[in-house]
Amino acid sequence: MPSSGYIYDITGTTPFQVYVSFSGDVTQYYYINEIATGDLPYTFDLPRAIQDQTAYCVKIVDGDGCIITGCTTT
């Protein structure tokens, strides 16, 4: 199971707030960190509860409040 997540590129306005959730549950997110374009590519530790899953979703909120989402499977 994955212990790390990766963000390679983001299009938007910095700073970016990074969140992750269980795949299929887009109501409860775990806050990861605030990053900037200069932090990319960005590697982060997944919360323990999500490490046991085979898929998770990432939500990024940019400096303008725009929301970028995507899910991945391992």
Image (cartoon, grey):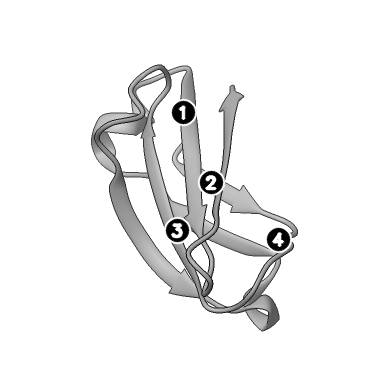
Q: How far apart are labels 4 and 2 at the CA level?
A: 14 Å
| Closest to the observer, 40 or 17 | 17
Q: How far apart are labels 1 and 3 at the CA level?
A: 13 Å
Q: Is residue 1 above or below residue 29?
A: above
Q: How far apart are labels 2 and 3 at the CA level?
A: 11 Å
Residue at which label 1 appears: 56
Which callout, 4 or 2, points to the residue nearer the camera?
4
| Residue contact between numbered discs 3 and 4, judged by CB atoms under 8 Å | no
Position in image of residue 39 (x %, y %)? 63, 77
Residue at which label 4 appears: 10
Q: Could you say which quadrant of the image residue 49 lies in?
A: top left
Position in image of residue 36 (x %, y %)? 59, 79
At 47% from the left edge and 17% from the top edge, which residue is drawn? 54
| Closest to the observer, 8 or 63 | 63
Sequence-wise, which precedes: disc 2 or disc 3? 2
Sequence-wise, which precedes: disc 4 or disc 2? 2
* Amino acid type for the residue under numbered disc 3: Val
User: Of the numbered discs in the image, which one, if any, rests on residue 5?
Assistant: 2
Q: Is residue 4 above or below residue 72?
A: below
Q: Is residue 51 above or below residue 42?
A: above
Q: What is the crowding at mark 2: few (fewer than 14 residues within 10 Å), some, or many (at least 20)?
A: some
Quadrant of the frame with the C terminus: top right
Is residue 25 left or right of 34 when viewed as pictured? left
| Residue contact between numbered discs 2 and 3, judged by CB atoms under 8 Å | no
- Asked which secondary structure carries label 1, the reply is strand
Q: How far apart are labels 4 and 1 at the CA level?
A: 18 Å
Sequence-wise, which precedes: disc 4 or disc 1? 4
Residue at which label 3 appears: 18
- Asked which secondary structure carries label 4, the reply is loop
| Closest to the observer, 57 or 2 | 57
